[in-house]
Image (cartoon, helix red, strand yellow):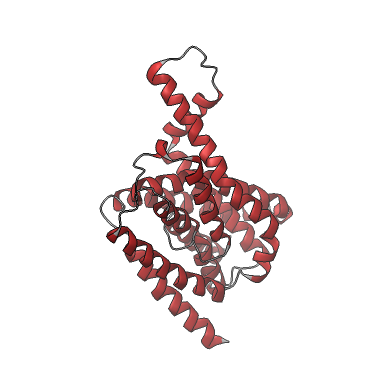
Amino acid sequence: MDLLLLAKALILGLVEGMTEFLPISSTGHLIIAGDLLSFNDEKGKVFEIVIQLAAILAVCWEYRVKLLKTLRDVTGRRLDIQGNQKTQVLQSNQLVLNLLLGFLPAAVLGLAFHSAIKAYLFSPLTVAIALIIGGFAILLIEYKAANTPLANVSSIDQITKIQAIKIGFAQSLALIPGVSRAGATILGGMVFGLNRQIATEFSFFLAIPIMFAATAYDLLKNWQLLSVNDIAMFTVGFITAFASALLVIKMLLRFVATHNFKVFAWYRIVFGATVLFYYWHLS
């Protein structure tokens, strides 16, 4: 058993779980961490796919009650329902439709540009620049939110189809490593009329289809790189990513109830500048 490899798996699992749902870019952090740990070869890329799956399963677990209820409402034959039950079914149908509409822009653009993005943009320098630009974007959006209240949607069931599509296009920006899928969807949601808590919750739900699709796509392309010899490494990374992601989800929901995202903006700017200086100096 390679203890050094297991240590790398543990570190990267923590990085994935702790950054996936914060507006600081998990992909960007994994690129930088993988580069620093010299774990950015083909096996490392497959490992990242596995731990991203663990993170999204953490969301499914946290929202398992609502997800199962939504699934029952959408797939069940409920022709005789009335009143409040009927309203709940309609809300479930609307949520599923909104998730589909939010999923499509990133899915289409991702399929079209996936190879080019991975070939040309997956580098620490690209991540550093995106982190800095994204940090200033968060500060600008938070400034507008503080001075001109943007939110008119205070429930996930009130999100309109147009808002879902707009948030979907905002999510597409996260195809660029370093932008942050969570940041793009949460801040995009705030710009398009959601309050901070609902934008965060919708970001969690929207992560489910896009991350499952991306994981399945990458696994189909790279399944031949999977090996039974790596089971221990994958297990350590998977469990670590799942547990840390679950913790972050719970903490973020409490955080956004009383705080804005400026602390993440300044973190992005400082971290991005540090990475930029480090890799620029190396080159």
The quadrant in which residue 137 appears is bottom left
Residue projecting furthest to the front: 148
Q: Position of residue 187 (x, y in %)?
A: 42, 56
* Vertical relation: 39 (above or below) 73: below
Which of the two residues, 134 or 147, is positioned nearer the viewer here? 147
Q: Position of residue 282 (x, y in %)?
A: 55, 86
Residue projecting furthest to the top: 80
Residue found at x 41% / y 20%: 85
Residue found at x 67% / y 50%: 217
The N terminus sits in image quarter: bottom right
Q: Position of residue 38 (x, y in %)?
A: 58, 72
Which of the two residues, 10 or 188, is positioned nearer the viewer here? 188
The quadrant in which residue 91 appears is top left
Asked if residue 141 can be seen in this view, the reply is yes
* Vertical relation: 104 (above or below) 146: above
Asked if residue 261 can be seen in this view, the reply is no
The C terminus sits in image quarter: bottom right
Residue projecting furthest to the left: 258
Residue found at x 60% / y 50%: 105
